[in-house]
């Protein structure tokens, strides 16, 4: 039943299938290029989605370059901040005690960090700051994971300083 020719055909079939599998893997890696980037630079696995282009983003970036946060915050427009808050609305609520994915932001400006009762914080925030001052909020909103490494907040941050200042002015007008 099993002679040398049958054994050779079976072994050849397995080797051929394995070769086709390896060639398919190589072709897929070439097409999708999951390795490093061009010239040795690394690329992240995913796409960056810019959240800009909304009505709160009408200030030019050139106007911010020479201004400090204090100057931007003094000239901030809470109305524009309300529009910027649309980016936060998916995870945060403004009603006192109404926690969602994130803690409520009612009276957040000047509030102790990690002080919302009934919300389970990750612990990384309390190591970063004691009070949510406008300056601390500005630094956190610019780069949440850079400001408080280990935070569970998945928001990438707000790049424009004027958007951050407007948002903080809006949050300051909500609450106590």
Image (cartoon, rainbow, N blue to C red):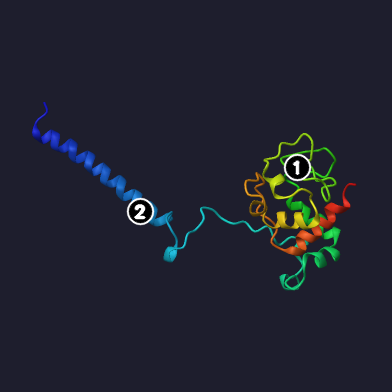
Q: Viewed as shown, does residue 129 lie left or right of 175?
A: left
| Disc 2 versus disc 1: nearer the observer | 1
Task: Classify the position of the N terminus by image quarter.
Answer: top left
Kindly indicate the quadrant of the structure image that contains residue 39.
Answer: bottom left
Residue position for label 1: 114
SS state under label 1:
loop
In this rendering, the count of numbered labels is 2
Of residues 133 and 4, which is closer to you in this image? 133
Q: Position of residue 66 (x, y in %)?
A: 75, 73
The residue carrying pointer 1 sits among few (fewer than 14), some (14 to 19) or many (20 or more) residues within 10 Å by Cα, namely: many
- Image point 77% across, 34% down: which residue? 118
Image mark for residue 101 = none
User: How far apart, in angstroms, are the residues tagged by discs 2 and 1?
Assistant: 50 Å
Q: Position of residue 64 (x, y in %)?
A: 75, 70
Q: Viewed as shown, does residue 107 lie left or right of 150?
A: right
Query: Seen from this angle, which residue lies furthest left?
Result: 4
Q: With respect to residue 31, does 121 lie above or below?
A: above
Circle 2/circle 1 CB separation < 8 Å? no
Query: Seen from this angle, which residue lies furthest right?
Result: 176
Residue position for label 2: 27
- Image point 75% across, 39% down: which residue? 100
SS state under label 2:
helix
The residue carrying pointer 2 sits among few (fewer than 14), some (14 to 19) or many (20 or more) residues within 10 Å by Cα, namely: few
Q: Position of residue 38 (x, y in %)?
A: 44, 64
Q: Viewed as shown, does residue 144 lie left or right of 43?
A: right
Q: Position of residue 127 (x, y in %)?
A: 69, 46
Q: Mark 2 or mark 1: which comes first in sequence? A: 2
- Image point 77% across, 58% down: which residue? 135
């Amino acid at each position: 039943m099993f002679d040398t020719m049958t054994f050779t055909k079976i072994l050849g079939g397995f080797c051929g299938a394995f070769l086709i599998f390896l060639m398919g893997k190589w072709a897929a890696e070439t097409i999708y290029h999951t390795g490093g980037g061009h010239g040795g630079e690394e690329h992240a696995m995913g796409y960056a989605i810019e959240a800009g282009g909304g009505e709160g983003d009408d200030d030019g970036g050139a106007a911010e370059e020479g201004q400090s946060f204090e100057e931007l915050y003094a000239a901030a427009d809470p109305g524009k901040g309300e529009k910027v808050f649309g980016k936060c609305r998916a995870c945060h609520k403004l009603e006192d005690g109404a926690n969602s994915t994130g803690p409520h932001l009612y009276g957040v400006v000047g509030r102790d960090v990690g002080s919302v009762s009934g919300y389970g914080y990750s612990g990384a925030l309390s190591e970063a700051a004691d009070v949510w001052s406008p300056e601390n909020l500005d630094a956190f909103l610019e780069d949440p994971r850079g400001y408080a490494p280990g935070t569970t907040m998945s928001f990438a941050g707000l790049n424009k300083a004027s958007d951050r200042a407007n948002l903080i002015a809006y949050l300051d007008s909500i609450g106590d």
